[in-house]
Each structure stands twice: as structure tokens, then as C-alpha cells.
Amino acid sequence: MSDTVTTVNPTTGKTLETYNVLSGKALEDAVQRCHNAFLDWRLTSVEDRANIIKAIGAALRDRKDELAELMTKEMGKLLKQSHQEIDLCAAICDYSAAEAPAAFAPEEREIEGGEKGHIFYSPIGVVYGIQPWNFPAYQVVRYSIASLIAGNGVLLKHASNVTGSGQMLQEIYEAAGLPKGLFQALVISHDQSDTLISHDLVRGVTLTGSDGAGRKVGAKAAEAVKKTVLELGSNDAYIVLEDADIDAAVQTCVTGRTYNNGETCIAAKRFIVVDAIYDQFRDAYVAAMKRVTPGDPMGEDADIGPMARKDLRDDLHQQVKDSLEGGAKLLCGGEMPETDGFFYPATVLENVAPGQPAYDDELFGPVAALIRAQDADDAMRIANDSRFGLGGGILERSQDLAGPELISWVDDNDDIRAVRSEQVQEVLAKLCGDEVSAKTLRTWNGSHAAFAAALDAPTLTITAMAEAAAERLHNTPTIARNSYIHPQIIGLADLPDRQRVAQLSALPQRQVSGLRLGEGRLIDFLNAN
């Protein structure tokens, strides 16, 4: 085990900073400090917690330029996208602060026989998060802010290549008034992380990462009977149907594959196009991908920056080569550039088939897999032919075509039944009441739900997002309380500048009691029954 962690600028390949790994004793002291801080924090009123969380949002905005620059230097995303990420994080703080007092207020419920039950929401203790490098701020904020405002303590093991970003977040949190020790970004090894999962004072564990990492962390947590939330990999399919607006579909699919340098769990990765328009879409898509320009992410001219680490680029290139050896055809990109840094070109493969990494596995970088389908039914079959969940999309003009097929896709994967799109307005009218938004915060960002959206746009995009982990959607505990999110819940992916409608599953004997309207975020439906 190395005693240090070194961060490297992926744009140049040069060292940024070196950090010392905590000793065993220092780690134990850190856990104890977090627990001690939690013992006081849990007694703080929700209103006082909310004030500090709101102050953290303000502090993130105040130091946005500084943090964004560090994020881009550490992992290579475009600087403007780092700014967007921090804006999202600050909005999460604002929303959490605004909704927490009502969300955690005690409840009184009627019980059979005329009696009444009282429900109180209490924190569980120290929550340990193992977070990835692709969104250095958001991945941390989305679990830590919800856990903190619920009254918990939070420990973070950030990905080693964004160690500096984790340290700066701790600094920002504490400068905004969060008690010292309550949130700590730990510089530790994988072996120390395993020890931390089983630590008696750690009461919950969450990881965002690969399915391989999820298996290991899930197994460790299960051995210690710890609550876990795992958000793992994906191989998201975008289906392009016959009546799609080709130009709009191409633009959507290029952005879906290259945003954040293609290093996003819910990025579009497989593009399944019906035979009737396959050639037309392919030619336009390849031309557009050829125009994607790699470059310095700190500048204004680049469309994509470098990949986050050299080993990640090497692994991606090997997946491309293995796919080509398995019968795929290279349409553009696919060559390792002879430049400084860890750049990889926007790449398109076709003739992608089972047995190839481009079909079977997640390609975490700017590589698109084109797959020809006979028709819409065949496209749905191909989309379902994956061990991954998480997300997907359908691009077409006709809502009537996409709706039922989307629902059948979600139903096959996650046992979800949805009403037809013509019932949407009636469903929304029933849901939108004074109390609906207040009860959502309890589900925090790691909870699993399924999402479907019908977007009123020239080219209809319907997106189904399932934050699926090892347990899919069934009996998934939240960190904030011992409750469960029922699998038959449909929400809506809220995309900017579009009109949204939602489809809700039929829940006879159940009542949906929560609706969250986030600014450009996800809309959740929480079954609090």
C-alpha cells in the first residue's frame, strides 16, 4: 500500500498534487470525530440544519470558479460543464434547505380501530460514501447534503484522481458553518475502505461506480448487515424510430454520447436505429461525430476534453479493438492520438453484436455503438438485451408510438405497469396538492426509482431512468429512515426548456404521497404508504 496519493492533470499528464494517506490510527480518530459530531448534530433542529445547508449552497456559488477549475484540472471535463455541475450542487442545497422542515416533521396517521399512530424521523448515524471521479462535486453533494440535513454524519472516500476536489468540498462545508468532523473527505486506501465499511460506528454505506465495485462493496456491507445504496454502471440504449426528426435525433445522440467526455453513467451508449432510416441516421451521425473537437478543457474551443486517467483511456481503446476483432466496423475515431494528455477521439462503431464489448459492456468514454434493428419491436428486444439498467431513450415524433413501447420496456425490466399517456393530465391533477412536495426529501438521492417522460417537442424523446442497483427496485431501504420505495412508481426526467408530462403506474390499494419539482432536475414520486 502506498503512503501517498498523487493527482495528475489528464490534459497534460503532469502531476498536480500529492496527498498523504491516513494512518490506521488517524482513520480511527476521524471516524470517532464524525460520530461525536453526529451526537450533537442529531439534536440540532431541522431548521438550524437547513440554515447551514443553505449557507453551503451559497459558499459553493462563491467559490464556483475556484472549485470548477480544480475539477477540470483533476479529471478533464470542460470548464463550462464544471460550472454547470456546481450550479446543480448549489440548487440541491437550496432545495434541501427549503423542503427539510416539512419533510421531517412528525406525522399522525389513522390506524384501524379508530386509534392513531405517530411517526418520527430520526438519523441513523455515520453514512460512508465511496464516490467516483466523473462528477467530483455532484456525486458528493447528492448523498452528503441529504444525509446531513437528515441529521447524520458523513464520511467520504473520493476517487483518488479527484482527491483535491474532495478536500475543497470539506473546506467549503466547514467554512459555511458545518461543525468540524461532521463531514470528512478521507484520503485512504481500498483496504482501509473495506475496514471502514465494517466499522461499528458506520451505519450506512453508499457507492456510485462500476458493477464490479458494487459487488465488492455490497458483499462487504452485507457481511456487516449494513444499509447500502448502490448506483452502478449502464449501457444505455437510445432507440431511433422511423418517424424521428433525423437532424434533431443526431444532435441529441451526439450530445448524449459526448457530454462530460462520454464519462457519465446515464450517457447514451448504444444507438439502436430501425432499418428504414438506419443508413440516413448513420451517415449524419458519423459526420457529426467527426466534427467533435477534442482540446484543452480550460479553453473555449474544445467539444470534449481528455479522459480522466491514462488507464481508463487504455481500457476503452482495448474495448474498441476487441469489438473490431469480434466483427464490429470502425466508422470514425478509434485511434490513440500522439499528443500529451489522455485524449481519445469521438468514435463510432457499427455492426455491433453480442459477444463484443461494445454490445455487452459499458464503454465509459466517447465511443458510440450503432446497432441496426428490423423494426420497433426488434429495437426494443435489442435494448432489453443487456444486464444493465439505469436509463434509456426513444426518439420519434409520435407520442402514440413511443408510449406503449417504452412502458413495455420498463415493465420487462422492472415490473412496472403504467397508464397510457392520455391519462397523464388526470394523474397530475390528483397528485398536485399542498403537501405533496414536502415528503420527498426522505428518499434522498440514492433511492431507487423508475422514471418515464413524454416530452412535448418536435422530436419526441421519452426517457426511462431507473437508478437500479443489485436489488433492482424491490425493497430498497433509504438512508434517512427505515422505509421502502415501492417498485411501481413512475416519475419524470425533467429536461430544460421542454414541456413535461408524467405517466404514473396504477396503484390500486396504494397512495402516492410525494412529488418533488426540482429546477431542471428529476421529479420523483414517492410511495410513502
Image (spheres, rainbow, N blue to C red):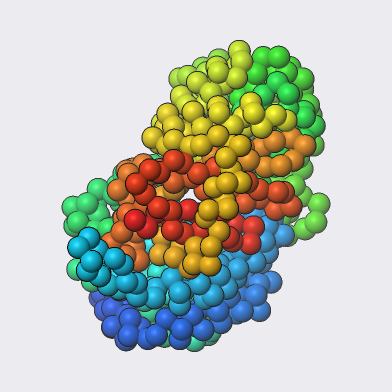
- 21 over 53 or under it: above or below: above
**Residue 222 coordinates in the image, percent (x, y):** 22, 51
Quadrant in the picture for residue 388: top left
Quadrant in the picture for residue 386: top left
Which residue is found at the position 70% from the left and 29% from the top? Answer: 398
Q: Nearer the viewer, residue 15 or 409?
A: 409
**Residue 116 coordinates in the image, percent (x, y):** 25, 70
Q: Nearer the viewer, residue 510 or 170?
A: 510
Which residue is found at the position 51% from the left and 37% from the top? Answer: 419
Using the rendered image of the protein, determine whether residue 338 is visible from the camera's viewpoint. Answer: no
**Residue 302 coordinates in the image, percent (x, y):** 76, 50
Which residue is found at the position 58% from the left and 53% from the top? Answer: 429
Using the rendered image of the protein, determine whether residue 521 is visible from the camera's viewpoint. Answer: yes
Q: In this rendering, would 414 be left or right of 465?
A: left
Which residue is found at the position 61% from the left and 15% from the top? Answer: 375
Q: Nearer the viewer, residue 512 or 19?
A: 512
Quadrant in the picture for residue 80: bottom right
Q: How many marks?
A: 0
Image quadrant in which the C terminus is located: bottom left
Image quadrant in which the N terminus is located: bottom left
Q: In this rendering, would 381 be left or right of 527?
A: right
**Residue 478 coordinates in the image, percent (x, y):** 34, 59
Please identify the residue farthest to the front as the structure is shown: 114
